[in-house]
Amino acid sequence: MRNLFACVAALVAISFAASAAGVEDFYKGKEISVIVGYTTGNAYDGSARALSRHMAKFIPGKPTMIVRNMPGAGSLAAANFLYGVAPKDGATFGIFSRGVPMEPLLGNAEAKFDAAKFTWIGSIGGEASVCAIWHTSPVKTWDDMLSKPFVTGANATSGTGVYTIILQKVFGAKMKLVVGYPGGNEMSLAIERGELDGRCGWSWSSVTSTKPDWVRDKKISIPVQLGLIRSPLLPDVPTVAEFAKTDRERQILKLIFSRQDMGWPFTAPPAIPEDRKIALRNAFAATMTDEAFLKEARLLELEVNLMTGDDLEKLVDDLYATPEAVVAETRSIVEAASK
C-alpha cells in the first residue's frame, strides 16, 4: 500500500511538472492581449496598463502584455468580444465595466454572454462609491436623506442614476434626480452654484483626486457608501446595505451594488485550458503584492484589495441565483432609471 501511495504521488508530481512546463512553453515569446472596453485615459484603461506593466513577470514564460482598447456600448462590445470572438487559449483577457456582468440578468438584450461562463482572473479591489452632499444642504446623515428633500445629479450616459432610483424605491429617500449633465465637472459646478445638493454614485477616488479641497475643508458630507462592504478608506461611513431590513431589500441591493465591490475585475474567455487559467490567476494574485505595482497603484489612487478569480466566480454565481421575482423587480427599477 505504501508503494502504491508513493507511485500515485510520483505520478501527480510528474503531471504537475509537465503542466507547468506546458504553460511556460505556451507563453514563452507569446503576446498577451489585454482588452479594455474604454478609450485610453479612462480609469479602467489605467488599471489595465498598470497591471500589464507588472503581471508578465509572474506568468511562466514571461510573455509580453499589450493593452488593446475596444470601446463601445459602455464596454459591452469588449465583453461580447471576450465571450464570443476572442481565442480561448489563455492569450487574451480583459476588463469591462464592473456593472456589465449583471446586464444579461437585468434584461439587456445586447449582452451576448453568460457571465457565469467567463474565466474570472481577479479584481484589483473594490471601488468605494458615495453620496457626497454639499455643506450648505440640510442633508448631513442617512436619516436626513429619508426625511429632507434634496436634489442630486447624474451624467447623461452614466449608470449611477440607477443608484438614486434604488434609494428612492427601496428606502423612500427624498431625492430628486436631475439627469443630463455632460460629465463630472459640470455636476461639480452645479453643486457649487447651489443647483444641486450633491451627487450619489460618485467614486471616492474621483472625489479625492478631483476635489481634494472639498474633502480637506469639509465642504461635503458623506452620509452613506453605495456598496455592500465598508471601504477601508471610509471606515466610519455606513454602507447602504446596513440599512436593509428584509431579504428582498438585501437581494436588490446586492444585484445593484455588488459591482462596487467587484471594482476592477479582469476576465478571460470561457473554457480556456485549466493550467493556463491557474497560471493567470496566480500571476494576477502575485502582482497584487508586488511593490512596483503597488507603488503605481498608489499614484493612480487604486485601492488594492485582491478579489481572487475564484471569489469573482462565486459572486457571479450567487447573483445569478437570485430569485426571479427579485430580479424582475430590480429590472423594473433599472428600466425606470433609464427613461
Image (cartoon, rainbow, N blue to C red):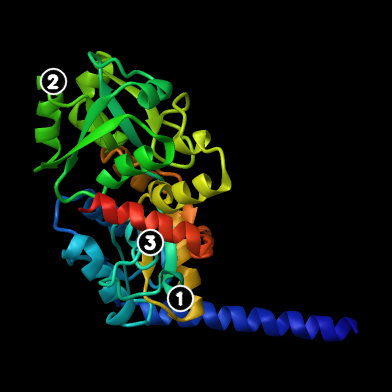
Compare marks 3 and 2 and give the one earlier in the sequence: 3
> Dot 1, crowdedness within 10 Å: few (<14), some or many (≥20)?
many
Toward the viewer: 146 or 308? 146
Distance CA(mark 1)–CA(mark 2): 54 Å
Which element carries disc 3, helix, strand or loop?
helix
Distance CA(mark 3)–CA(mark 2): 35 Å
Amino acid type, residue under disc 1 in the picture: Arg
Q: Quadrant of the N terminus?
A: bottom right
Compare marks 3 and 1 and give the one earlier in the sequence: 3
Q: Is residue 128 visible?
A: no
Q: Is residue 299 visible?
A: yes
Amino acid type, residue under disc 2 in the picture: Gly
State the image quarter where residue 83 is shown: bottom left
Toward the viewer: 140 or 233? 140
Q: Nearer the viewer, mark 1 or mark 2?
A: 2
Residue at screen point 44% across, 66% down: 120
Toward the viewer: 186 or 84? 186
Q: Is residue 110 left or right of residue 115?
A: left
Residue at screen point 44% across, 53% down: 255
Which element carries disc 2, helix, strand or loop?
loop
Q: Is residue 207 left or right of residue 19?
A: left
Circle 3 residue: 102
Q: Nearer the viewer, mark 3 or mark 1?
A: 3
**From the viewer's perspective, is residue 154 above or below residue 110?**
above
Toward the viewer: 238 or 63? 238
Q: Which mark is residue 276?
A: 1
Residue 314 position in % (x across, y down): 54, 62
Q: Which mark is residue 194?
A: 2
**From the viewer's perspective, is residue 289 above or below residue 221?**
below
Residue at screen point 16% across, 51% down: 157
